[in-house]
Amino acid sequence: MNAPSTRSEARRTAFILATAQAIMGSVPPICISVGALVGSQLLDADKSLATAPVTGFNLGVALGALPAAALIRRFGQRNGFMSGAGVVGIGGMIATLAMLRGSFWLFAMGVCLVGMGMSFSQQYRFAAADDAGPAFKARAISWVMAGGVLNGILGPQVVIFTDDLMAPVKFAGSFASILVIAGIGAAVLSLLRLKPKMQVVAEASHEPVRPLLEVIRQPQFAVGLLCAVGSYSLMSFVMTGAPLAMIGCGFSSDEAALGISWHVLAMFGPSFFTGLLIARFGKERILATGLLLLIGCGVCALAGIELWNFWLALILLGLGWNFGFIGATAMVAGTYRFSEKGKVQGFHDFVLFGFVAFSSLMSGIIFNAYGWDALAMVIFPVTLLCLVALGMVVVLARGQKAESPA
């Protein structure tokens, strides 16, 4: 057998991981599109915590990130990824049993466990890149991202075809299907022939490792993190409340699921060319474009409560997230050295997913108290703050460049 680094093996690995991404990645749209609806069903009079299960999913992804990385390093990518699929399946089973028993908090715990299992899938694109040579690395990542595009189709379709499978408990069949999806995903991942342990790439660096505080105090890092948190949290905030708002306006759960489908497609579809746009126009302009698209989402949401208002708002929300988050990530990536990568990225993700989990929880509380318009209104001050901060750091960078010797 050829070495794993050969081009044919790299293609095989990328194809398997792209397939696994398409399968396993259909789980988050299931949890997000109907998690709040199930939470509302399981609660009595007070519906303010209806989005807590979605918060649990986001929190699970955050809490599982470090353990997932440790398990993959300890047992290898193939076994680590299969273990993650197993955790997803167990979480789906617990969530289903909780629905049958009518237990809200057990359901939230099950969805949280699903999120922890899904944290393993965040490593798929890196695994594909690690197994590819320099010439194929970018294409390998693109293949895995292509699998992400399919998530917006498969997940909502699963909801549509299984929501009444275990009637009279609506959506129990959708969460039971997660166990089946995890089993298929594990079977696909078992075909991997990756190295037993992640190879740590040692790059010589004569630059000293700076304290974390020194790195995060850089204006470019601070603004990049602010914009990443703002774009990702707004996406989670509005997306989590959108299904509740659509159901409240008389639309069906299938129409709500299709709205999330369009949203997820808009989130991942532009990823094939966002990097090229950043290379041509600069990360700051792409980030600003993303923030303006988020403002467009708010305007569309406030313009009416027809189905097209919801769907178009969700599409703009997905596009805004893609440009805003990827642009912000590119800003942050330019502020630290290779030797500082681990601790800086860990701090970045801890802050980011902490705010994302909080935003999904607040989505239900604010929607229950003030309605859909209030969710849309939150977009404007957050994006304005990010745009002002971005403008300041751009002006500062130009001033420093002008003062530097030619």
Image: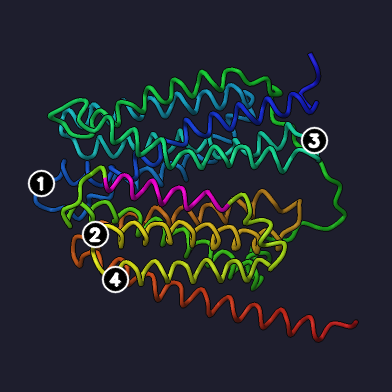
Tell me the number on the disc at residue 380.
Answer: none
Secondary structure at badge 1 equals loop
Which of label 3 and label 1 is nearer to you? 3
Give me the C-alpha separation between circle 3 and circle 4: 48 Å
Residue linked to disc 4: 302
In the rendering, which numbered label is found on residue 133? 3
SS state under label 2: helix
Instruction: Report if the CB atoms under discs 2 and 4 are less than 8 Å apart.
Output: no
Proximity of marks 3 and 1: CB atoms separated by less than 8 Å: no
The mark found on residue 365 in the picture is 2
Q: Secondary structure at mark 4?
A: helix
Residue 352: x %, y % from top left: 50, 56
- Disc 1 residue type? Asp
Hey, which residue is sitting farthest left in the picture? Answer: 45
Q: Nearer the viewer, mark 3 or mark 2?
A: 3
Q: Could you give the CA–CA distance between mark 1 and mark 4, rounded to whole angstroms?
A: 29 Å
Residues shaded magenta:
255-270
Distance in Å between CA atoms under marks 3 and 2: 48 Å
Q: Quadrant of the C terminus?
A: bottom right
* Residue kind at label 3, given as amino acid type: Gly
Determine which of the numbered discs, if any, sits on residue 44 in the image: 1
Among the two numbered marks 3 and 4 on one chain, the one whose residue lies closer to the N terminus? 3
Residue plotted at (55% across, 77% down):
389
